[in-house]
Image: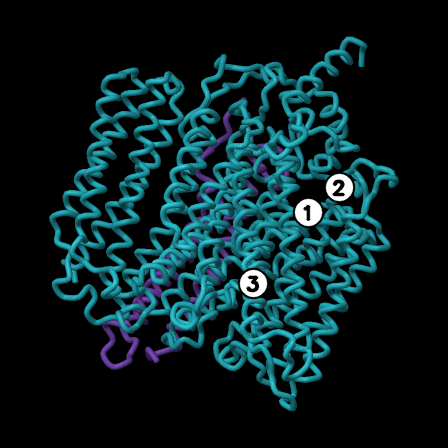
Chain colours: A cyan, B purple
Amino acid sequence: MSAEDEAIRRDQEERLLQAWKTPTGWRYWSEVNNTQVGLWYMAAAFSFFLFAGVLALLIRVQLAFPDNDFLSADKYNQVFTLHGSVMMFLFAVPIFEAFSIYVLPQMLGSRDLPFPRLSAYGFWCFVIGGVFVCGSIFFDAAPKGGWFMYPPLTTRFQEGLGADIWLLGLSFIEVASIAAAVELIVGILKCRPPGMRINLMPLYAWYVLVVGAMILFAFPPLIAGDLLFELERMLDWPFFDPSRGGDPILWQHLFWIFGHPEVYIIFLPSVALVAMMVPTLARTPIVGYSWIVLAAVGTGFLSFGLWVHHMFTTGLPGISLGFFSAASVAVAIPTGVQIFCFLATLVAGRVARTVPMLFVSGALAIFVLGGLTGVMVAIAPFDFQAHDTYFVVAHLHYVLIGGMLFPVFAGIAYFYPLVGGKMLSPRLGRIAFWLMFVGFNVAFLPMHFTGLRGMPRRVFTYPEGLGFDGLNLISTVGAFILAAGVLVFAWDVVRPKGRQPYGPRNPWNAGTLEWLAEVPPDKPWGVRSVPVIESRYPLWEQPDLVRNVDAGRYYIPDAEERKRETLVTSVLDAEPEECLRLPGPTYLTIAAAASTGGVFIFSTFHWWWAAAVSGLLGLATILVWLWTGTALVPEKPWKDVGMELELPLYRSGPESVGWWAMFITMLGDSTAFASLVFGYFFYWTVHDDFPPEGAGPDLAWPAVAAVCILGSWLLTLGARSWNREGRGTAFTVALGVAVVLAVAGAAALLIAPAGLDPTSHVYPAIVWVLMIWAALHVGLGVVMQGYVLARRWAGRLTAEYDIDIRNVALYWHFAAATAGVTVAVVAGFPLVG
Amino acid sequence: MVKSPRLRDSLWMLIAAPTIWSLHFLFSYVTAAVWCAKLAEGASLGGARTAVAMYSAAAIAAIGAVAHYGWRRHCQETRHPHDVPTSHGRQRFLGFAILLLAGLSAVAVVYGALPAAFIASCH
């Protein structure tokens, strides 16, 4: 490299560093770069894991001896409920989101994912909600109905705020999960490096794509269930109260439509970690790439056909059990395919005996055992015997610890050098592994027998002499050995490493792009230049890749305008489409998370005014965030991104990442709505007289609502076209009338059920919920219509730069469909009946 | 850059077969649930079993069509490996993945149909 080239390179790096500089001091917390936020996210999730681990030890101490009084029954209920809830909601799912937003930009050779502020917002929501839920136990106010919160136990037999804290706190965290899903799906589909066609994508990205999609269809039913549950607890709307037409089984359906896919939402990303580590550790490409993609996609689908296997003992018809039992057995096929692919890769390669490999081997051994007991409990007659016993506790821990925790620990040991450039201690890693592996099996293997001997789960103690005593004591000893292993590992992660030398770059000699990371890792720009990819293992098979990336010979090697940028590419073949400007540090995300969090937290204590004020603040913050940070008109239409390529700085409609984010968000939203509609028809199946004769509402007001909302939708679509044609007046008039019609439509939706008392019976209650849901969506549509009007007046939305109106039009497709289906169900179905 | 052939359709086709399984599953479950709750005279599953059999035949036929599509995609190009960095490699990979998913979905549909073949009562 000549001196002149060297000088150019230094200048480029200087400008890139300025653009991507991490703020210092207090402003550090305003950073939104996914790599930084991912680190915070992982640290927070891991802290919640340690907290829930301590709760597990409390459980085991209480159960070590018969008739123990270490914990009272009430405290025990709080402890085991929080243990399960925190492990599932605050560790298992978030740790995957955290790691994904941390590593995906690097794995995809991208500067960052498309919505860094959304990730930061999700992270702050997660922290606020998580601290709120965990903190409750210190005030003796924690939830105590088990992690699935079954009514009527939690609606009629438990005092206090615990259930509200669970419902509202965790609903808030689910918002963070959906935010992460949007970021990850769009990131994988649109931010891959040029040339990384869909057949060359790292398997991790395939898995995350599947899991992101699963989150969109799994979490919303729980949000819908939470809404019904909270309305029952706060306003006495009887969704789960059989004396007024409700049915607690509906909660079980909604919970497990979420709950079973969630097991796979936890499991698949961990398998994805294994799929990334195994080829490196076996020093050979993965065997059966296409088969693993089959397994990931197939498992993603089949996992939605399993939920009733948690409800085998609720008295559903045998044939229903049969359908779910069949799907539960079928899901073992793709699960097995992945395991065989990993084993084949290990056999085909030369395995390095490293700490990550130890944890991977342990994971496979434990998970296979858990999977086999899973097939046992998928058989309904066996489940009738084992249901609600410690056999199930043993099974789920084998699945989750083998399928998730051990791979995560393997992943930490493997990816740790990416964070600080230093290696973990192999000696401490081996000690930790053996303590954990032995401790785990000593703790959980006996539980199979405790369960088969008849010990029910969730009892706070047991009398001596029933055959449980020795087994429980062994389990407790094992739990402490497991905890010791976790502690050793945690110490290795956090111990000061100031004097330890940096490890080599790409220490495992891996083939995928995240190992481009420089040592020491002090460059916050993600990747020096965005490479062209021609292989599944570019670091193995593209000889000069690292040198060329470092020398800035690929795309966007510079930041002339000192702005954060990344490439957007096409979905299938990763052809460059846009140079995307990314937003920089801001406190708006923290403010938005705090104010939206306030709505949920204040509502828990019935402080309605505070909740309303917080909600308005949240809306205002989000509007400021959108106004100042999104759909910005660039100073020039095209930009030279290097390698003799010019790309646009602005794309709208389906070519833009924002359009996809809206589409994906609304898919999730529609799933929540579909869950409410499912609730309506569920009540129809369980009652002979549903809807009750002459219960209303009449046809008139719903019809008015439908016509108004249809008109508003059509005018919004018209405004989109007229804007593109530069017809400003037509745009303004159309949207003005659309606003009026939408307000009238929303009002008509709320007037329609005015004569119905939602506390009297489940029918008026479910009608009210559907109407309010639709009206809220139309109301939000009105805010959006007002927003785009203001944007055009301010010159931030033009005929050429029209992201906002195209996204709002997309939203209105969904809002109009929601209102249309609501009217058809509420006003139309009684006519059919 | 040169646009690749048939850019839009393949990723949706990837999920076609499992989507057919989902619909088969949903229809079978809802039919049986509504039949037992609303329509059954006595406790006989009668009509619901016929309906599930029809759904299964339709689902298998549709999955067969998807499998054929995947097979053609996989075989119509010259026999590149799946990991070559060209649109042909991508197409062959997607074709193979579509075919595999069709196989899994077909097995899952047959599994799903079996309860209706063996169970005759709503109890």
Say which quarter of the image contains residue A691.
bottom left
- Disc 2 marks a residue whose amino acid type is Ala
Which of the chains bears the disc numbered 2?
A: A
User: Which residue is disc 3 drawn over?
Assistant: A82
Question: Who is closer to the viewer here, A242 or A710?
Answer: A242
First in sequence: mark 3 vs mark 2 = 3
**Where is the N terminus of chain A found, in terms of image quarters?**
top right
Q: Is residue A293 left or right of residue A409?
A: left
Cα distance, mark 3 to mark 2?
39 Å
Q: Are marks 2 and 1 on the same chain?
A: yes
Can you say whether A137 is above or below A575 in the image? below
The three-letter amino acid code for the residue at tag 3 is Leu
* A510 lies above or below A46: above
SS class, disc 1: helix
Residue depicted at 40% across the width and 26% down the height:
A803
Label 1, on which residue? A276
Q: Is residue A798 left or right of residue A29?
A: left
- Residue at x 68% of width, y 79% of height: A472
Q: Tags 2 and 1 in contact by the CB under 8 Å rule?
A: yes
The location of residue B104, given as percent across then percent down, is 51, 58
Marked residue chain, label 1: A
- For label 2, the SS is loop
What crowding class fits label 1: few (fewer than 14 Cα within 10 Å), some (14-19), or many (20 or more)? many
The picture places residue A391, in percent across and down from the top left corner, at 59, 76
- Which residue is denoted by mark 2 in the rendering? A510
Identify the residue at the far top of this view. A4
Q: Is residue A806 visible?
A: yes
Q: Residue flagged by tag 1: what amino acid is it?
A: Met
